[in-house]
Image: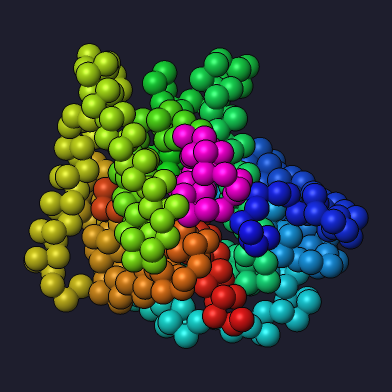
Amino acid sequence: MSREATLGLPFEAAGARQYVPDAGHVIIAVAAVSFASVGMTSGLPMPVALANAVVMTAVSAIALALMDRIELALWGLVPLLAIVRWEPAPVDFMVVALFVALVSRGEILGRAPHPLALVAATLFVTSNLLALVFAVDVGRGIAHAATTVHLMLLAYVSYLLAVRGHEHGERAYIAASLALVAMTIATLLGAPFAEALRYDDERVQGLFKDPNVYGPFVLPAVTLLMLGFGPRTALARAVLIGTLAIPVAASQSRGALLAFGVAAAAVGAVAVFRRWRPALGVAVGIGTLAVAGLFAYAIVSADSTSHALLEEQAYDANRFAAQDAALTYLADHPFTVGVGPGNARDVLGTVNDIHETYLRILVETGPLGLIGLALLIALALSPLRVARPAAAAWAAAIVGFLAVGLFIDIFHWRHFWAAAAIGMAAATSVRAR
């Protein structure tokens, strides 16, 4: 089995001593960006917080620039994707530090983005700028547009690292997801910090802002395991997949359940097309267990709060009302260039934002923004053309995320952009061989 198909940490292989200095650099970088994030969110005077952020990000950038194998920084970047309770999150400073480090090493201009990625980025920037002209809340629009630009930078940095060693991104994502499982189990067992990781008495959100984001995070790890990445035996991988279902269940997120099912179906379809029999067997097994689990869930929990989540909720009415208002607005303004990034609720006068990715992009940034999103999706799904399980696994996870996007706004999910970038890197490295 190839080295990509092992779950071992990068420091466990023969000759591991050469990686020890790089591991130290990653630890320093993560610690520095964590201090930067804490300083920005701890109520310090803004000049002090900004000075701290600049200094800590510079320390992180220097540590990363001195690495021998900078792709090992994925072991710092990927786990930080699961720590996004506050803004700016540590991963945001990590992205800036990595970009500075890559520039200082002369690696930015050495590998240009995919042409479609450049077109998509141009469309995103153009559509946001045009829509800002009509924004009711310009400040919110600028912040929303800046977030989009930052996520494009996150994707580019992730791609540059993963194209040098995408297996580190795959291992790091599985490790981060298993850490999320451990945190979830501790929360459910009433650990001292459990209250801080709960959304309410029924649902867990971890270090995310919402259970609907927390639950689907593990999806790429699930699809990687389904397609053979990880332990050598199918039984061991099946156990890990079952373990990764714990955060999905603890989130009690219908979107997470949908993503899990759609991604498993995508893996099954790829396995049939590629004639990957072991992966097909795992997909069928998971599908059978999922159906059985749903029946058991419906019978056992008929009177529980969890069961009520399967029924229409009050916030569903607000969500659908916002979507109806958006469709009405588009019918009345067919030639709109967008109401402004992040401005849909103000313009539509609804209680909630539009919890539908594609409709929200169209309303807020117009047709140009939607075309940019379509190009991004095409790029994220392009690894399906490569006959390599790990590359297809990232794309299958993206299919699951896109399904959730019909009911939840996923456009600013950091792990969505990172998964798309690492999957493209995995496919690109295969084509280059």
- Residue 22 belongs to the span the image colors magenta: no
For the C terminus, the image quarter is: bottom right
In the visual, does 433 lie left or right of 328?
right
Q: Position of residue 35 (x, y in %)?
A: 74, 45
Look at the picture and state if 289 lies above or below 189: below
Residue at (41, 56) in percent of width and height: 277
Total numbered labels: 0
Query: Foreground: 383 or 83?
Result: 383
Residue 362 visible in rendering? yes
Q: Look at 36% across and 41% down and name the residue there.
A: 285
In the displayed structure image, the side of residue 170 where residue 367 appears, left or right: left
Left or right placement of residue 316 versus residue 83 in this view:
left
* Residue 289 percent location from the top left of the image: 34, 34
Magenta segment: does it hold 230? yes
* Residue at figure coordinates x 52%, y 38% from the top left: 235
Q: Is residue 232 above or below residue 129?
A: above
The one nearer the camera, 46 or 270, is 270
Tell me which segment is drawn in magenta. 217-242
Dominant SS in magenta: helix
Q: Does residue 156 sit above or below 173 in this rendering?
A: below
